[in-house]
Image (cartoon, rainbow, N blue to C red):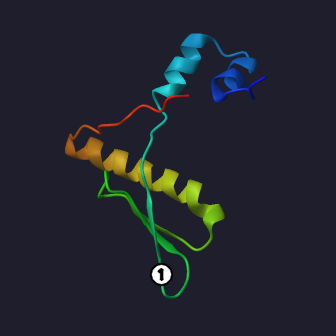
Amino acid sequence: MNPPTAVDQIAEMDQTQEDVIEMKKHILKIPLLLNPQKEGGWTVTSPILPELITEVDHLEELQSRVEDAVKAVIELYEDMGRQLTTTPLEL
């Protein structure tokens, strides 16, 4: 038996299929590059979002820092009237 997928787990939380589809629209798949710094930590960038730049000292910070950086890029794009092109994540 296969382990439950993310969609299965969401469905178990009493979400309708429409809710799951709506949630998938907001999941972004963004490649990241982590460049080590001499003084420690990493600079995080993305080849598809040149405006996304952040730093982390510990990998445990990566998700929250990238989420904040992506939100800032989305706000920037909205302010500039630019469209954020994304590739939906297949769950």
Quadrant location of the N terminus? top right
Query: Is residue 36 shown above or below 16?
Result: below
Q: Nearer the viewer, residue 22 or 42?
A: 42
Residue appearing at x 63%, y 23% in the figure: 7
Residue appearing at x 57%, y 60% in the figure: 62
Query: Is residue 53 shown above or below 79?
Result: below
Q: Position of residue 49 (x, y in %)?
A: 32, 52
Q: Position of residue 85 (x, y in %)?
A: 29, 37
Query: Is residue 81 shown above or below 72?
Result: above
Residue appearing at x 29%, y 39% in the figure: 84
Residue appearing at x 39%, y 52% in the figure: 72
For label 1, the residue is: 37
The extreme right residue here reads 1
Q: Nearer the viewer, residue 29 or 1?
A: 1
Q: Position of residue 80 (x, y in %)?
A: 21, 46
Q: Amino acid at mark 1?
A: Gln
Query: Could you tell whether 79 is left or right of 52 in the image?
Result: left
Q: Position of residue 86 (x, y in %)?
A: 35, 37
The extreme front residue here reads 1
Element at label 1: loop
Q: Examine the image and state in which quarter residue 46 appears.
A: bottom left
Rate crowding at label 1 as few (under 14), some (14 to 19) or many (20 or more) other CA atoms within 10 Å: few
Query: Is residue 35 shown above or below 52?
Result: below
